[in-house]
Image: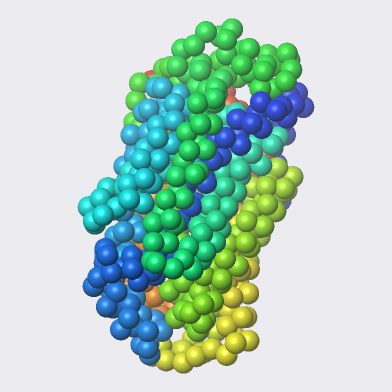
């Protein structure tokens, strides 16, 4: 057996209850946090009336570049556009750190309610914006809502779901992200056809719909048994809740694990200090840092953020820009469905490894093709068949991401952390993800200009590195209860040195 491959028997239970309607309904509502994250109104950046009203200098550059010969540098210096796009992610970064405390002190469901209300206000402000400050304030509120939503939704899904379908139910979040992206593409395409130039307002205003869905749904969400115990609610009440969501009275073993985890959590006064400094949490810290970093270094956002710009630069016709984006959006949704079906059957590691190999091959193929057709000068063109082949390569790349690093990048950090540091770990995961998302949004167009086709080779190198990391350092976590996850790391060839024996585990908390 290769090093790094861990077969776990301990932790898999046959009495984890049924897939109840209560669990399904709660997880469907909680996963709506992904819908508000995925809905992307970035397409308004190509609307001339939007640019004329808010970014007139951008409009001049937009028009000047239509006949520009260098396909690499059509959009390098677009700081106003980039700041509009990426300000949301800075707001989400800060909000996720605040949400860590709120999620632990007030419950996962309360954090989702806060997220939905703030996002709703932000959606209304951006749609009604009369000037740049109003637009940016609305965008920041959207980011705050998203930061709270990601922080609380993923923890809620991982804690609410039975171990044997935790991956599939948690992937509901990423499914909604992909659906939101796809809907955003179609909305931008449809509203772009509206005469009179007000279509961009409708595109922004429709973000209210997923916000209202989450506002209403969150009002009916109960908190998770894990959070209830952590916040000191009576054991009998928690046990009844556990029996209700598992659909069986036989929950004693899982309940005792929750009590054990809660007792350990109460011994921790500073979750952040424990997570960052205590060697016992070193495996969890590494996963909560490197997984979101690697997710962004796949290069997915460098393509999806500015897909219309890149597609145009690569030779697609003006009308085909949003159509091409819609095609990759459909591929994203379908491939995520594949991952939902396979994550609890095949496991996390096989999806990571297969997706990594496929992304690497696609990135190298795209880089090679662009290098041959455009060289370092950026001058050249694609025939229709070559443009179609390039789109196919991008679709295969998007599909590989959608069943590997897309959903798994959110699942792994949310399921591996013990209860006492779970909120802090998830906040660290979200904040790092948003930081690198912001960084990619800020730098991707400039990188494309300076590195040219080498940018795709760079991302291919990162994909190779992260695939090696997964092979050696990520143990398989499928079918393991969330409060029994330490058993997986304890048996791992490398992380086992950091996890204390079970007998002494409570003594390790201070």
Residue shown at the point (40%, 35%) measured from the top left: 117
Q: Nearer the viewer, residue 424 or 144?
A: 144
- Residue at 63 percent across and 74 percent down: it is 392
Residue at figure coordinates x 54%, y 76% from the top left: 320
Q: Residue at the spot x=74%, y=17% of the render? A: 248
Question: Can the viewer see residue 262 in this picture?
Answer: no
Q: Position of residue 229 (x, y in %)?
A: 51, 16
Locate residue 341 relative to residue 329 in the image: left or right: right
Q: Position of residue 219 (x, y in %)?
A: 50, 26
Q: Is residue 30 in sight in this rendering?
A: yes
Q: Quadrant of the C terminus?
A: top left
Q: How many marks?
A: 0
Above or below, 202 against 197 in this view is above
Is 368 left or right of 58, judged from the image as shown? right
Front in this rendered view, residue 285 or 235: 235
Percent position of residue 409, x then y? 53, 49
Q: Going by the image, does 96 lie left or right of 184?
A: left
Horizontal relation, residue 393 to residue 76: left or right: right
């Amino acid at each position: 057996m290769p090093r790094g491959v861990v077969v776990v028997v301990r932790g898999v239970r046959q009495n984890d209850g049924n897939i109840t309607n209560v669990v399904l309904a709660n997880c469907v509502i909680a996963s709506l946090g992904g819908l508000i994250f995925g809905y992307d109104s970035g397409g308004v950046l190509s609307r001339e009336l939007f640019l004329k009203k808010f970014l007139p200098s951008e409009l001049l550059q937009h028009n000047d570049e239509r006949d520009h010969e260098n396909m690499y540098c059509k959009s390098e210096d677009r700081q106003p556009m980039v700041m509009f796009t990426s300000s949301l992610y800075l707001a989400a970064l800060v909000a996720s750190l605040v949400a860590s405390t709120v999620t632990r002190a007030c419950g996962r469901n309360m954090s989702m309610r806060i997220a939905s209300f703030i996002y709703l206000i932000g959606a209304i402000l951006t749609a009604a914006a009369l000037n740049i400050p109003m637009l940016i304030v609305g965008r920041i509120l959207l980011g705050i809502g998203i930061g709270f939503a990601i922080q609380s939704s993923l923890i809620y899904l991982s804690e609410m779901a039975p171990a044997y379908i935790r991956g599939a139910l948690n992937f509901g979040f990423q499914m909604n992200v992909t659906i939101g992206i796809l809907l955003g593409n179609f909305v931008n395409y449809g509203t772009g056809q509206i005469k009179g130039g007000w279509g961009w307002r409708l595109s922004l205003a429709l973000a209210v719909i997923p916000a209202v869905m989450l506002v209403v749904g969150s009002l009916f969400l109960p908190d998770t048994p894990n959070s209830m115990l952590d916040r000191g609610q009576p054991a009998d009440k928690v046990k009844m809740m556990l029996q209700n969501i598992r659909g069986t009275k036989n929950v004693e073993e899982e309940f005792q694990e929750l009590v054990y985890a809660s007792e350990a959590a109460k011994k921790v006064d500073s979750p952040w200090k424990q997570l960052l400094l205590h060697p016992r949490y070193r495996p969890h810290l590494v996963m909560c840092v490197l997984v979101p970093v690697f997710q962004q270094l796949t290069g997915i956002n460098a393509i999806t953020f500015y897909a219309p710009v890149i597609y145009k630069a690569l030779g697609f016709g003006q009308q085909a820009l949003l159509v091409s984006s819609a095609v990759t959006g459909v591929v994203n949704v379908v491939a995520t469905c594949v991952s939902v079906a396979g994550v609890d059957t095949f496991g996390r590691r096989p999806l990571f490894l297969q997706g990594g190999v496929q992304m690497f091959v696609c990135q190298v193929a795209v880089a090679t093709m662009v290098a041959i057709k455009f060289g370092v000068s950026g001058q050249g063109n694609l025939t229709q068949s070559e443009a179609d082949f390039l789109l196919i390569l991008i679709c295969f790349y998007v599909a590989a991401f959608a069943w590997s690093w897309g959903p798994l990048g959110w699942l792994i950090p949310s399921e591996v952390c013990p209860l006492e540091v779970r909120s802090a770990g998830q906040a660290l995961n979200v904040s790092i993800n948003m930081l690198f998302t912001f960084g990619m949004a800020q730098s991707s167009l400039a990188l494309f200009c300076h590195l040219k086709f080498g940018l795709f080779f760079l991302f291919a190198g990162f994909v190779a590195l992260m695939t090696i990391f997964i092979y050696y350092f990520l143990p398989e976590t499928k079918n393991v209860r969330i409060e029994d996850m330490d058993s997986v790391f304890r048996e791992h060839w490398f992380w086992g040195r950091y996890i204390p024996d079970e007998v002494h585990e409570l003594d390790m908390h201070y």
